[in-house]
Amino acid sequence: MLNKNLSFINNKFENINLNKHFHEEYSFSLIYDGNHLYQNEKEKFSLGSGIIQVVNPYEIHSTKNSSWSYLNIMLNKDLINDININLKQNDNIKDILFNSLIEDKIAVRLFYKLFILLKNNSKNSLEIDISLIEFFEYIIKHHSSSKIESFADITCSKKDINIALEYMNDYLKKDDITLDKISAQIGISKYHFIKEFKKHIGLTPNQYLQIKKTNWSKELIKNMPLSHIAYECGFSDQSYMIKVFKSFYGFTPSKLKKIII
């Protein structure tokens, strides 16, 4: 779903002028170097490092004699509408407008995390999905025409969470488990499931699964090469498994393997 609904690029311009134009998608650009002299339908801006520049669909904008580097993510309207509608549980609320500039350290951190996951071609669709929802839930609440008080308050019980946990614990390790599949087990939107899961468990669904996969890898460490273990336990590759393993245990799987032997 993500590939056809968004695109991303790390780009750099040198002394460029861009004539008036518009996009049909939402465009979010985190500037990390240089200065962008930018004009939309209402204002002129001089944008520097650490600012997220937003261009809403069909918003006419241009650039004058600018040199800047930026990380950009473009998403189509359907994806943003889907997030917004589900958060509000209101099918009539569509095509929201985001603020032209977002100067917010939390938003920047969430954006950068999402971009890095996309850039590294993460095969963990659940991890990308969670990161995407976290970023857009935050900026919809704090940097858009939507109002925070209008978000739907959907909760689930500990019994519901246990049903989801049972499904997460029992699925085949090599299968691709998605947020949609997990939340469907208890009949709740994935957008609200993330919040409820974290409230009850203290972790995101992806963090929980990473811990489970790491524990599974320990069971195989004695008799199997690391590359095979990564595959059997559902990691995207061996290097990512080592990184996750070390983040929990403070040492690599190879060191544990030597200790066991």
Image (cartoon, grey):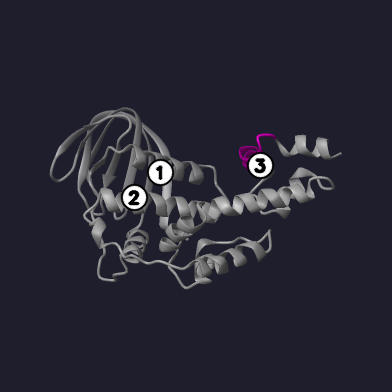
Q: Is residue 247 magenta?
A: yes
Q: Which amino acid does label 1 sit on?
A: Leu
Residue 245 is tagged as 3
Q: Is the magenta stretch mostly helix, strand or loop?
A: helix
**Which residue shows up at 33% across the image and 45% down it?**
28
> From the viewer's perspective, is the residue at label 3 or at label 1 nearer?
3
Q: Can residue 3 be seen in this view?
A: no
Query: Which numbered circle lies on residue 138?
Result: 2
Q: The disc labelled 2 sits on which kind of residue?
A: Tyr
Q: Nearer the viewer, residue 39 or 200?
A: 200
Q: Mark 1 points at which residue?
A: 110
Question: Which numbered disc flags the more N-terminal residue, 3 or 2?
Answer: 2
31 magenta-colored:
no
Which range is magenta?
241-251
Question: What crowding class fits label 2: few (fewer than 14 Cα within 10 Å), some (14-19), or many (20 or more)?
Answer: some
Badge 1 element: helix
- Drawn side of residue 254 relative to residue 5, left or right: right
Q: Is residue 74 above or below residue 80?
A: above
Q: Residue, x 81% and y 36% (percent of image)? A: 259
Task: Indicate the quadrant where residue 10 lies.
Answer: top left
